[in-house]
Amino acid sequence: MDFSLPAEAEEFRTEVREFLAEHLTEEMIDATHDGTIHSWELHRALADRGWLSGAVPAELGGGGRDPIELAVLIEELQLHRAPIDAMGVAIIVVSMILEHGNEHLKSTVVPRLLDGQALGCFGFSEPETGSDVAAARTRAERDGDEWIINGTKMWTTMAHIADYVVLLTRTNPDVAKHKGLTFFLVPLDTTGIAIQPVQTMATERSNATFYDDVRLDDEWRLGEIDGGWEVMKSALKYERGIAGGQFPSPPVIDAAIDWAKSNPGAGGSRQIDDPVVREKLVRSLIDVEVCRGFAYHTAALASEGAMFGVEGSMTKLFASESYKKHCRWFLDLMGTDGLLTSEDPDAHLGGRIEENFRHAPVTAIYGGTSEINRNLVAEAHLGLPRARP
Ligand SMILES: Cc1cc2nc3c(=O)[nH]c(=O)nc-3n(C[C@H](O)[C@H](O)[C@H](O)COP(=O)(O)OP(=O)(O)OC[C@H]3O[C@@H](n4cnc5c(N)ncnc54)[C@H](O)[C@@H]3O)c2cc1C
């Protein structure tokens, strides 16, 4: 078997590395310690290169670059620890609008998202509904040409810097839960919206967002009335495409290798000479290769025209569970050294192990928890019976 990528993809990798050498700075990475994993400067540079529009499928009217190139782009951005949370969201929101949106959304919102001037965010989850997203309670009621929206969303990550929230609402409470949902693209400066920070143990800042008699013209509706589940399915489809490009954190493995090489072990040797340490490091590197196999397999399927499906769930599940496991191993190997935070001048590589140890668990929650992804793999890939109502 030949696992090498097409020559064009490797040429593109070189181009991405040159771009990052020019545009990504340590200051941008350090700035994420405040919890917002975004740099406007980097985001706009990515947009100027055409890599946001390039990632949108051609059949929707996007740049339609090869999905293998999108996987290369995401891999390189992650390898270099680039703050890119907004990039994936922008690509998904644009794809949703191009698939389901009206002319107003296509002409006013899409260009702003693609040229990096505006950001979107997702308002799916609520205090009582996360995995069971179709049970959303936020109400949207028709009033002439307008809608009045009331409710609360939880985990509206990036709402504090975004311009639009893709809001899942209930328009019909009297039908089966999947059948009474409607999406809106809501400008976040609309009267009646409040945003409160939610700090996570991962340093990452998310938000609770509140909608109090928010009035919206019907032109901000995304998709059919009560047809929100179709829009949701396409959001999940594009999200899995992006999630399919996840790789379990090589930067944290590099940090552990660096620590093992530069720290003494038993009897005058180095930590890296200890077979127990070596085994953990090698197993981590093998996981990375397995994960690359998943990610590039997903991308190759998409490149041949298949839409992202359960393969994205497999990659996300394997990547986030491996990432959690590696961080646990490394913290265990390093003992108290591993607990020093980025604020401690003695912390190894700026406290990278400690920070990743706190960050890894949330990657197994957002974008669909590991349990939900296991269910999807069990049902869609292994043909096991459905476990949910
Ligand atoms: C840092 C962070 C950022 C996020 N950003 C966003 C965002 O931008 N926008 C947004 O809309 N949401 C966002 N989320 C929300 C995220 O998608 C939800 O937290 C996630 O879907 C889980 O929902 P929940 O928290 O309500 O947990 P629950 O759904 O209540 O789940 C609790 C536990 O039960 C398990 N479980 C639930 N149902 C099943 C089942 N059927 N079978 C087996 N196990 C099950 C889950 O795996 C989990 O372990 C974010 C979350 C976090 C932590």
Image (cartoon, rainbow, N blue to C red):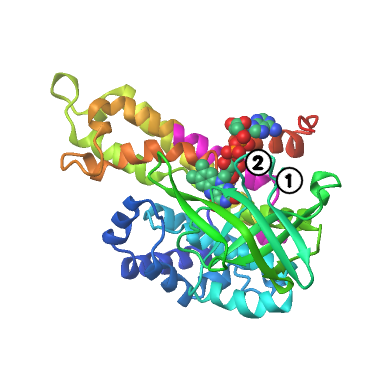
Neighbourhood count class around disc 2 (C-alpha, 10 Å): few under 14, some 14–19, many 20 upward: some
- Residue that sits furthest to the left in the current view: 268
Residue 31 inside the magenta-drawn segment: no
Residue toward you, 12 or 147? 147
Residue toward you, 65 or 328? 328
- Residue that sits furthest to the right in the current view: 175
Q: What percent of the width, then of the height, locates residue 16?
A: 42, 66
Question: Which residue is at a point 53% across and 54% down the rendered structure image?
Answer: 4
Read off the magenta span.
302-324
User: The disc labelled 2 sits on which kind of residue?
Assistant: Thr
The answer to whether residue 292 of the structure is visible from this angle is no
Taken as a whole, is the magenta stretch helix, strand or loop?
A: helix
Q: What percent of the width, then of the height, locates residue 173?
A: 81, 48
**Quadrant for the C terminus in the image:** top right
Q: Which residue is mark 1?
A: 134
Q: Which residue is mark 2?
A: 129
Q: What percent of the width, then of the height, locates residue 216?
A: 67, 69
CA distance for labels 2 and 1? 8 Å
Judged from the image, the secondary structure of the residue bearing numbered disc 2 is loop
Neighbourhood count class around disc 1 (C-alpha, 10 Å): few under 14, some 14–19, many 20 upward: many
Mark 2 beta carbon near ligand 1 (under 8 Å): yes
- Total labels: the figure holds 2
Question: Which residue is at a point 24% across and 45% down the rendered structure image?
Answer: 350
